[in-house]
Amino acid sequence: MVKVQVYVTLKEGVLDPQGSAITHSLHTMNYNEVKSVQTGKYIELEVEKTDDLEERVKEMCEKLLSNPVIEDYTYTIGEAVS
Amino acid sequence: MKFAVIVFPGSNCDDDMVYAVQEGLQEDVDKVWYTEESVADYDAILLPGGFSYGDYLRSGAIARFAPVMESVIEEAQKGKPVLGVCNGFQVLLEAGLLPGAMQRNKNLKFICRPVELKVDNNETGFTKSYEKGESITVPVAHGDGNYYCDNKTLQQLKENNQIVFTYQDDINGSVEGIAGIVNEKGNVLGMMPHPERATTSLLGSSDGLKLFQSILNHWRESHVLTS
């Protein structure tokens, strides 16, 4: 088994209403050094190790885990665990 | 005319959709469970509102891969009328049958109230019974109704006259106030407001009824009159 960590974030230029609300809240708490907040999703998969693992992870990201219209994704494939 | 209302786990406006067809049009309608394999026997397909799969991951993202969707996409590509309302619109976007994506409302609030819409395009099979520019009152009920598309897509929507409904006031941050769009062919309509909840004055507005009448009239023009 391999642990795959997927991060999904909004594309540059796409407004992030949740990020704006969090920024505003941090400012009211006097964390004025915060210039912007971007929210996203973290998805962790436990996957059987196969030869085409990376290719299939990319497919999963593009078909389901992210929406390519508004989101970007990155992933890391960890060391094999038993 | 025979309508299908697709029911996903978490759909909750399916009964309203059935009511609109039965009471508003006096036509046949079946609820079709998401595990069914074919909707080929129906003349029109309606995707209702609700929270399919609990809106997990993104609204409509998981429903888009439900077994019945393969047939829905096939029938849509053949030119059959497909209407997605609210969550149904989100499913159509995720399925790639309509361009763009839905985001959380700009003010992060769930909005549930009647809104004023403008009919921007009355030349589709869904809007022929409306006047161009007509102002109608239809309820919305959504948290993720902030329509987004990039500039290139927006230009295409405008050039092909695909913007069908717009909000008269900016309620959710949607690009250009977009409330409903059709695909290039004009046989797939997605809209956030709920016409099925506005089919009789008892419900506060009957402005949504013309949408269902348009579907029926459009179908009759190409089917009944020729037979």
Image (cartoon, coloured by chain):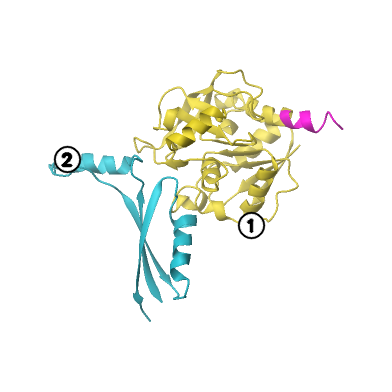
Chain colours: A cyan, B yellow
Q: Chain of mark 1?
A: B
Residue at 60% across / 27% down in the picture?
Answer: B208
At label 2, which amino acid type do we have?
His
Please indicate whether residue B9 sits to the left or right of residue A79 in the image: right
Q: Position of residue A6 (x, y in %)?
A: 37, 61
Please indicate whether residue A73 sits to the left or right of residue B135 in the image: left
Pick whichever, B192 or B29, lies toward us.
B192
Q: Which residue is mark 1?
A: B35
Pick whichever, A13 or B143, lies toward us.
A13
Q: Is residue B20 among what the camera can see?
A: yes
Q: Are marks 2 and 1 in contact (CB under 8 Å)?
A: no
Q: Position of residue B71 (x, y in %)?
A: 67, 51
Which region shows up in magenta?
B218-227
Q: Secondary structure at mark 1?
A: loop
Q: Quadrant of residue B196?
A: top right
Q: Position of residue B176 (x, y in %)?
A: 43, 28
Marks 2 and 1 sit apart, C-alpha to C-alpha, by 48 Å
Q: What's the mark number on residue B133?
A: none
Residue at 13% across / 41% down in the picture?
Answer: A32
Q: Is residue B9 among what the camera can see?
A: no
**Is B222 within the magenta?**
yes
Image quarter where the N terminus of chain B lies is: top right
Residue at 72% across / 29% down in the picture?
Answer: B218
Vertical placement of residue B200 versus B153, above or below: above
Q: Which residue is mark 2?
A: A27
Image quarter where the C terminus of chain B lies is: top right
